[in-house]
Amino acid sequence: MTDFSPREIVSELDRHIIGQKDAKRAVAVALRNRWRRQQLEGSLREEVMPKNILMIGPTGVGKTEISRRLAKLAGAPFIKVEATKFTEVGYVGRDVEQIIRDLVEIGIALVREKKREEVKAKAHQGAEDRVLDALVGKSASPATRDSFRKKLRAGELDDKEIDVEVADSGNPLGGMEIPGMPGANIGVLNLSEMFGKMGGGRTKQRRTTVRDSYDLLIGEESDKLLDQEQVVREAIAAVENNGIVFLDEIDKVATKDGHSAGVSREGVQRDLLPLVEGTTVATKHGAVKTDHILFIASGAFHVSKPSDLLPELQGRLPIRVELRALTKEDFRRILTETEASLIKQYVALMQTENVDLEITDDAIDAIADTAVALNGSVENIGARRLQTVMERVLDDISFEAPDKAGEHYTVDAAYVHKALDGIAGNVDLSRYIL
């Protein structure tokens, strides 16, 4: 859990996302409130509930990215799901509780990775011993092992192929799911886990190079040093107290009338209610309470309105934030100011081919102008349009780069207009190409 102030959180988000000040402030306060809750004592801490957020805005303006960066900043378990992927209980399809089960798996992976780092030095030693066993055998004299250990650490044996014995994680039954109930195999009866235990930890021989064997063996040695039950306990605690669920396309399950499709969508909303309000979900790792999980819902609401959601669900999303459509100036800043901007990415990619790429200011203006025009005339897909336009502009350079090592390319406004000539102006053609 981060102890950043809301101002510091917004500043961190500004490094990656342009504009959307209101949305950044809302998520920053929500994250800080989690830290504040942790400082409270006993019963009062349990009473403080997260203030869930509803983000309203067109596609490609930063809704998902804000949530994703927030979770990364907090080091919290995070999952993004589309509300349209779920069906009402009793229908064929995924039920909403699968969200929490998936979030627990993500939490376990996060905690395990963190704990692996803590035991990495010891695990590296164990992996080195196993590599030596594969190279010289377990019965080799200490002098021989020391000699090979020095060569190993000097990197002289990196490309040598060895046979190592690794755990066989394959499921003898294959992926087994109950028809119409994806994910049901991780509930009460987990056959793959049961048969794995009956097999007594099966292993298999794998041929690999010394260099590549380390990642594999360090992972195995780390897991031997970890208390797996402790990992699960910490993961469940992290999910319950710090978990973030991003519910995208919430507007698609909003409905105005009572026709059959609308009834099904309303059923999904009703299933989401207890999850958002606070319930206990059974997973194969144990019960998980959702009372303090932060839910961030988002939707474009082109056809429906937030008021078309069930009143009960509206009440559980108390903070409303509207994200505005992006302007030419926003596009320009996205191309140049963000930490891993598209311009920096393309320049770095070309440098791997020993090609020097320069994109001038007027070229950036031309790309931004084209993106705005296309979003207005074809379909508004927000900042994602920039990737499409950039790919089209740099198509020839990207294709020829391996044969042009040592050369310098300057992309200016004239180059951009030439690359897009006849496409950007033709609306029908733009629908398919840009």
Image (spheres, rainbow, N blue to C red):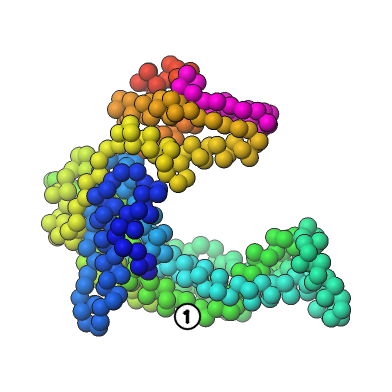
Q: Position of residue 1 (x, y in %)?
A: 37, 69
**Residue at (30% x, 70% y) in the render:** 35
Left or right of residue 258: residue 75 = right
Q: Which residues are magenta?
A: 394-415
For the residue pair 289 and 283, the one nearer the viewer reads as 289
- The verdict on residue 407 being magenta is yes
Q: Residue at x 17, y 58 (%)?
A: 318
> Where the C terminus falls, by quadrant?
top left
Query: Is any atom of residue 161 visible in this view?
Result: no
Task: Residue 214: tell me if it is visible.
Answer: yes
The one of 331 and 173 positioned closer to us in this rendering = 331
Counting every numbered tag in the picture gives: 1
The residue labelled by disc 1 is 229
Rendered location of residue 183, percent (x, y): 41, 63
Q: Where 326 falls versus 17 (above or below)?
A: above
* Front residue (pair 425, 181): 425
Residue 424 picture quarter: top left
Amino acid type indicated by mark 1 = Glu
* Residue 231 falls within the magenta-colored stretch: no
Question: Up-down: is 343 above or below 143?
Answer: above
Query: Element under label 1?
Result: helix
The image position of residue 136, as x and y in percent, is 84, 72
